[in-house]
Amino acid sequence: MFDMMRFLFGEVEGLYAVASKHEYKELDDFSVLLKFTSGMHATLATAADASWLYPFERVEVFCHHATLITREMESLTYSINLEGHFTQQTMQQLPREEKWGYAQEDRAFVDTIVNSTPPLVTALDGLISVELVNAVYESVRSGSPVQVKSSEFSL
């Protein structure tokens, strides 16, 4: 989810997180408020002990008179007006490898090797995701917002 949010909104500037234990010995429920250098903000909520009510995973993006919602990579619903009209696309009939992006990832990986195309995702992207997770735990421990300086990360 951190990768997707960075893809959609840019680099994370800071975050504030709270967490609790319910089902396991470790922290298993998190709420994270993220602020991006683009000026956008996002909320990430995750619960290890949530019910099994489908969809298990959803993304909702709210913009100026526009909303975009994905449900478990099965459907995309969006509205770009005030009248309540919306468009819905379904991906239910696509093979899992395609709707979950595996086929596209494989094509991009091969293209990087065969055609020397710059990779879409780098090791630095992976490092930043790990650092964001660390920042979440730091915020939970301290009870305070944490500044994130992803521009300072390097390999």
Image: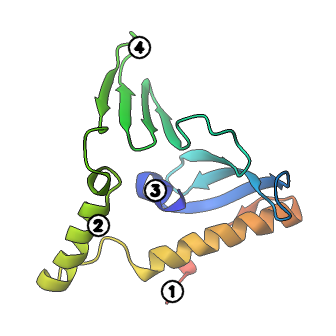
Give the spatial CA distance, label 2 vs label 4.
36 Å
Q: Which residue is mark 2?
A: 105
- Identify residue for label 4: 82
Is 142 situated left or right of 45 in this image? right
Question: Pointer 1 and pointer 4: residues touching (CB < 8 Å)?
Answer: no
Give x and y (percent) for residue 85: 35, 14
Q: Secondary structure at mark 1?
A: loop
Helix, strand or loop for disc 2: helix
Q: Amino acid at mark 1?
A: Ser
Q: Pointer 3: what residue?
A: 4
Q: Earlier in the sequence, mark 3 or mark 2?
A: 3
Please tell me how crowded label 1 is: few (under 14), some (14-19), or many (20+) other residues with Cα within 10 Å.
Answer: few
Q: Mark 1 and mark 2: span between their CA atoms?
A: 24 Å
Q: Residues within 10 Å of mark 3 (few under 14, many from 20)?
A: few
**Which residue is label 1 attached to?**
154
Closer to us: 126 or 14:
126
